[in-house]
Amino acid sequence: MALDFTKNKKYFIFAIKETLKFISDIPLVVLSYLIPKESNLYVFISHVGDKFNDNPKYLYFYFKKKGKKVVYICSDKSLLKRLTEKGINAVYSFSLKGIWTIARAKYIFITHSVKGVSRSLIGGILGNFNIIQTWHGIGFKSIALLDPNSLLKILQIIISTKILKVIVGIRFKVILATSDAIKEKFEKAFSSKNVFITGLPRNDVLFNHSFLFVDYRRDLGLNKFDKVILYAPTFRERQYAYPFTDDFLEKLDKWLAEKNYILLVKKHIYDRALKVESNYKRIWDISDKVEDVQELLPHIDVLISDYSSIITDFALLRRPIILYIYDLERFIKECRSFYFDPREVFPGPFAYSQEELIKILSDMSWFEDSNYKERYEKFLDFFHKYKDGKSCERVEKLLEEIS
C-alpha cells in the first residue's frame, strides 16, 4: 500500500522520528552481532524501561535466586536511583554500560514492544537479541496484529502486511501464554509459532508471598477494615471515564463506613480522565501509591473491573469479581475490540449502572451459589492451564529445553 504523506501526516512524522532514533541505535545493533552472548546474563525490561513491575520483575527475583547474573534495564534515571537504593542490580539503558549489557545478554525479557530494548522499533528488530515476550496481561481485548488500532496495524500502511508478519513472527524467541485458547490468539496476534503455555510469572506472587517486594497491607493500613474492595478499570484510549456521579460516591462512602469496608481505586497508568476526590473517608485513590498492582491483589477481598486483564489474574485467587461495564458499547466503538466477549466467557455478575453495582455489592450471596462456582471454574480453566504458582519455574525449564 502506497503511503500518501499529504493525507497521513502523523505517519510521516512517526517514520521520521523512528528513523532518527534508529541512527542512535546503530552502535547497539552492531555490538549485538560482534560480541558473544554471556550464557549466564539475563536482562529484564518492564514497559519501555520506566517501570519495575509485571512479569520481568518476578523473573528477575526468581533467576537471581537461581544464581543467574540478572540486570534490570531502566530508561528512567529516577527509577534507576530508586532500584539501586533498594539493592536491585539496575543500569541505565542508554549508557555505555546499558548498551553493552543489552548486547551481551543471553535473554532479554520484555512486556511490550522491542522499544524496551532499543530506542526505535527498527533497532530492536534488526539487532541480534534473544527476546522473551512475557506480555503484560491476558484478557479479553484484541492485541498486536489482531487489534485494528495497534501500532503494528499502523505500520502496515508503511510496509506490506506480508513483510510485517514475517518481521513480527521472527522477532520473539519465546512468547508466553496461559492456556490453549490464549496460545491460539497469540500465534495470530504475533504471527508466530513460538508461543508456549507457562502461565504468567507475575501470578506466582498470588501463591507465594515470598515474592512480595512491598507490603501494601501494612503501608496502606488495610488491616483495620473488614473488607477491602478494589476498583481497577482498564485504559480507555479516548480518555473518558464517568463511572460514578458525585452523589453516588457520597452515598457509597457512607455505606462503606457503615460496613467498615474500604474501596481502593487503582487507575491505569495512562488514565488521565478518572478523577477521585480526596475528601472521602472510605474511597481512596491509591494510583500513585501502588506501583505494582500485582503485589496488592493478595490483600483484596473483592475486585471491581471491566475489560482489564487484572480480572483473569485475580480469578486465580478464587475471590469475588464484579464487571462494571457501564460503557460497553462505547468502549467497543471508540477504544478496543474483543477477541473474547466478557459477557460470554465471564460468569458474571455484570453491573451496567452504578445502582446495579451497589446492589450486587450489598448482597453477595451470588458468590456462594454452586452453579456460579461451576461457571467460575470453567472461566478459570479457559484462561489458565496452570493454577499452581510455578510459572517462573516453567519458564526456566522452557529456556533450558530450547537453548
Image (tube, grey):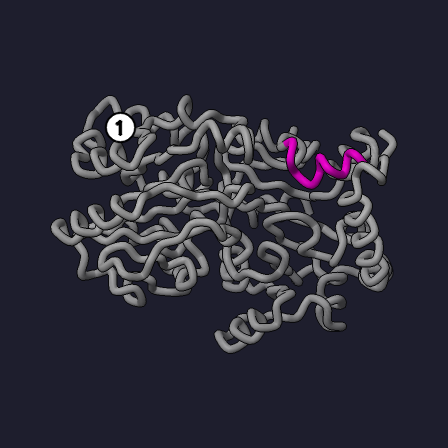
Q: Quadrant of residue 388?
A: top left
> Mark 1 is on which residue type?
Lys
Q: Quadrant of residue 387?
A: top left
Secondary structure of residue under mark 1: helix
Tell me which secondary structure the magenta stretch mostly adopts: helix
The number of numbered discs placed on residues in the rendered structure image is: 1
Task: Tell me the residue that label 1 is attached to.
Answer: 373
Q: Position of residue 307 (x, y in %)?
A: 45, 36
Q: Residue at x 27, y 51 (%)?
A: 263
- Judging depth in this view, the residue of 200 and 246 nearest the camera is 246
- Asked if residue 60 is positioned above or below residue 234 in the image, the reply reads below
Whole-percent x, y for residue 153 in the image? 71, 35
Q: Residues within 10 Å of mark 1 (few under 14, many from 20)?
A: some
In this view, the residue in front, 353 or 141, is 353
Q: Is residue 28 magenta?
A: no
The quadrant of the picture occupied by the N terminus is: top right
Relative image position of residue 5 (x, y in whole percent): 85, 40
Vertical placement of residue 399 versus 4, above or below = below
Residue at screen point 25% across, 58% down:
280
Q: Is residue 106 visible?
A: yes
Residue in the foreground of this view, choosing between 55 and 165: 165
Say whether residue 347 is left or right of residue 57.
Answer: left
Residue at 70%, 50% (x, y): give it: 114
Magenta segment includes 152: yes
Q: Which residues are magenta?
A: 148-157
Residue 187 visible in the snapshot: no
Is 41 placed above or below 131 here? Answer: below
Instruction: Indicate whether 289 appears above or below 307.
Output: below
